[in-house]
Amino acid sequence: MIKGLAITPPTIGRIAIGHVVERNGKRIPEKDDFFTITTQVQNRDGWLAHPLQAKLAEGCPNGKLRAIPVKLLFNSPELNLRAQYSAFDRSSGRPECVGDGHSARRNSDRGIEEVSCPSPGGCEYGREWGCKLFGRLNVQIDGQDDELGSFILRTTGYNSVRTLAARLEYLNAISGGNARHLPLTLRLRAKSTMLSYRTPVYYVDLTLREGDSLTEAVSNAQAEAKRQMEAGVDAVQLEQKARLALANGSFEESVDDGSAVVDEFYPEESEDEAGPETAPTTVTLTRPAKLTNRLGRT
């Protein structure tokens, strides 16, 4: 394994709830009230739609996809969802500092350094670089043709990260450590807050499939886990290797990935542009005004 290279879960596509538009010479993220499933290829008009997008959106009201049938790649919540405080160099897309609220890895003239991480609200470096909560969720979508591949959903939304983290912990606990065998649905929900001026803010949730009872879903998951184990599928080894692979590098995002992340989640915005249609969806995680999140980017 090449040292310094984070080996992430194999990705065959993206799940997005927004897109980037060009306005007044700037590329600005805009929020959608539906999911879009894309490939990893983009052209001048944006990311190309994945074939599963048309298939799953068929029959949805107004063609808006708000629920995706998924399964997890791993049982362990922290492997499915990696959430950290993250800062990027906007000019290069290079990750600059990544922390968990206790400690962080930071780029410096002396290389990668281990430093304390007081969270962005209490960190001068974090305020300077626009550090914010950044989560990555990998899921498998029903109908994909790669049994070890996954689709990645990235979010800087506090509501989405908190909800997904809780769901993953609960689902794995209640299934006896067999969450990867549960048939699930990735859902887009809405809520209103004082910060959003009572305008709906969208966030991502993870639930059982509609019509499935908890007891039936857990029973089937345990039976499937037993069947796969008897067939020689070693989920324990899979997770051990995945942990080692992720820990092999200092940062999960490469410069190539970081450029797309900066474009969509770390935009440069002026105070005038961050008007009433925008509102922060994290708690003291961005610089005031200049780095205010677009409304609903949760």
Image: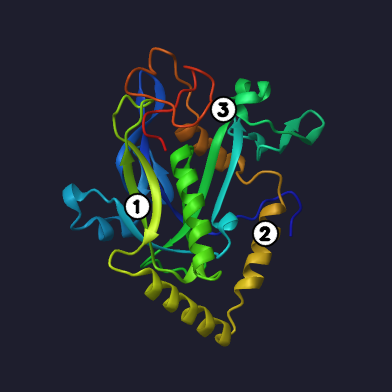
Mark 3 element type: loop
What is the three-letter code of the residue carrying label 3? Answer: Arg
- Name the residue rendered at 66%, 72% in the picture: 237
Can residue 164 be seen at all in this image of the molecule? Answer: yes
What is the CA distance from the residue labelled 2 to the residue labelled 3? 28 Å
Residue ID for mark 1: 187
Residue lying farthest right?
Answer: 110
Residue in front for this viewpoint, 33 or 92? 33
Query: Badge 1 local density, few (<14 within 10 Å), some, or many (20+)?
Result: some
Quadrant position of residue 67:
bottom left
Q: In the rendering, at what x and y percent does residue 195 appear? A: 38, 25
Query: Badge 3 local density, few (<14 within 10 Å), some, or many (20+)?
Result: some
- Name the residue rendered at 58%, 61% in the picture: 76
Q: Is residue 64 above or below residue 219?
A: above
Are the residues tagged 1 and 3 within 8 Å (C-beta)? Answer: no
Residue in front for this viewpoint, 282 or 88? 282
Q: Is residue 59 above or below residue 118?
A: below
What is the CA distance from the residue labelled 2 to the residue labelled 1? 27 Å
Mark 2 element type: helix
Are the residues tagged 2 and 3 within 8 Å (C-beta)? Answer: no
Q: Which label number is shown at residue 243?
A: 2
- Name the residue rendered at 32%, 69% in the picture: 212
Query: Badge 2 local density, few (<14 within 10 Å), some, or many (20+)?
Result: some
Residue ID for mark 3: 90
Q: Is residue 28 above or below residue 6?
A: above
Nearer the viewer's eye, disc 1 or disc 3?
1
The quadrant in which the N terminus is found is bottom right
Q: Is residue 135 above or below residue 168?
A: above
